[in-house]
């Protein structure tokens, strides 16, 4: 019997045909039998090319299903530079001059959008009042490895917190960069420590984007 898909990942996508300022981004769900077949997006605005996917209507919107275990495939590119893929689900891919032009056009659309619009997030102070998970934007002050744990110090200019991440984590966190955390939770408000859930995510935010610029400006005051 064929093994069923064990891993699943959902992303919000847009391009020049879908203006996120006027409509909801399209949802893409990836299904795979192994973790490595799921695209490991680490930056806001990353570009992904999809092959042989299915689209389904859901509540007046369209959803994309990318089942790598059946026939679908993907190729992941950096949000700002380069035409060499960061990773891909297949062994090889074609890349024509027309597709290169499409990649550059999507980059222009993406950069323009994120330079103008802020990412949805609450401050660390506001996160204290949340009963459930919260999304937040932080600056990485310090990263130290201690045994099997990476100890991260984060700030948003008003509050500083600690976050422990396993050293074998999929998240790449470096000092002096802006990150957006999806689904954080306070473990101890007294000692200002937060944690990640199984479904949490961390994405790097380019300094060219409005959210990062605003946060860095706040930190300089």
Image (cartoon, helix red, strand yellow):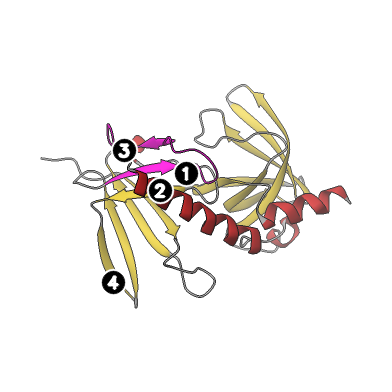
Q: Which residue is identified by label 4?
A: 57
**Residue marked by disc 3:** 89
Q: Is residue 149 left or right of residue 221?
A: left
Which is nearer the N-term, disc 3 or disc 1? 1
Question: Mark 1, mark 2: which one is toward the viewer?
Answer: 2
Dominant secondary structure of the residues highlighted in magenta in the image = loop
Of mark 2 and mark 3, the one earlier in the sequence is: 2
Q: Which mark is residue 48?
A: 2
Label number found at residue 41: 1
Q: Residues within 10 Å of mark 2 (few under 14, many from 20)?
A: many
Q: What residue span does the magenta drawing correspond to? A: 73-93
Task: From the top left corner, tell me how far across and down residue 26 is, in percent.
Answer: 40, 64
Q: Secondary structure beneath disc 2?
A: strand
**From mark 1 to mark 2, how far is it between C-alphas?**
9 Å
Mark 3 packing: few (<14 Cα in 10 Å), some, or many (20+)?
A: some
Q: CA distance from mark 4 to mark 1?
A: 25 Å
């Amino acid at each position: 019997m064929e093994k069923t898909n064990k891993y699943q990942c959902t992303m919000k996508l847009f391009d020049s045909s879908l203006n996120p300022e006027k409509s909801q981004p399209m949802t893409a769900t990836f299904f795979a039998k192994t973790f490595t077949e799921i695209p490991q997006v680490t930056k806001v605005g990353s570009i992904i090319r999809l092959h042989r996917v299915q689209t389904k209507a859901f509540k007046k919107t369209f959803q994309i299903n990318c089942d790598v275990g059946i026939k679908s495939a993907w190729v992941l590119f950096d949000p700002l530079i380069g035409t060499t893929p960061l990773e891909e689900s297949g062994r090889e891919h074609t890349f024509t001059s027309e597709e290169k032009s499409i990649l550059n056009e999507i980059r222009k659309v993406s950069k323009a959008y994120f330079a103008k619009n802020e990412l949805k997030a609450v401050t660390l102070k506001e996160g204290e009042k949340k009963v459930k998970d919260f999304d937040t934007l932080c600056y990485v002050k310090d990263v130290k490895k201690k045994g099997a744990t990476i100890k991260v110090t984060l700030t948003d200019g008003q509050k500083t917190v600690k976050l422990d991440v396993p050293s074998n984590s999929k998240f790449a966190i470096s000092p002096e960069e802006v990150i957006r955390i999806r689904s954080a939770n306070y473990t101890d408000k007294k000692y200002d420590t937060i944690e990640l859930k199984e479904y949490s995510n961390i994405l790097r935010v380019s300094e060219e984007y409005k959210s990062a610029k605003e946060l860095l400006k706040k930190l300089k005051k």
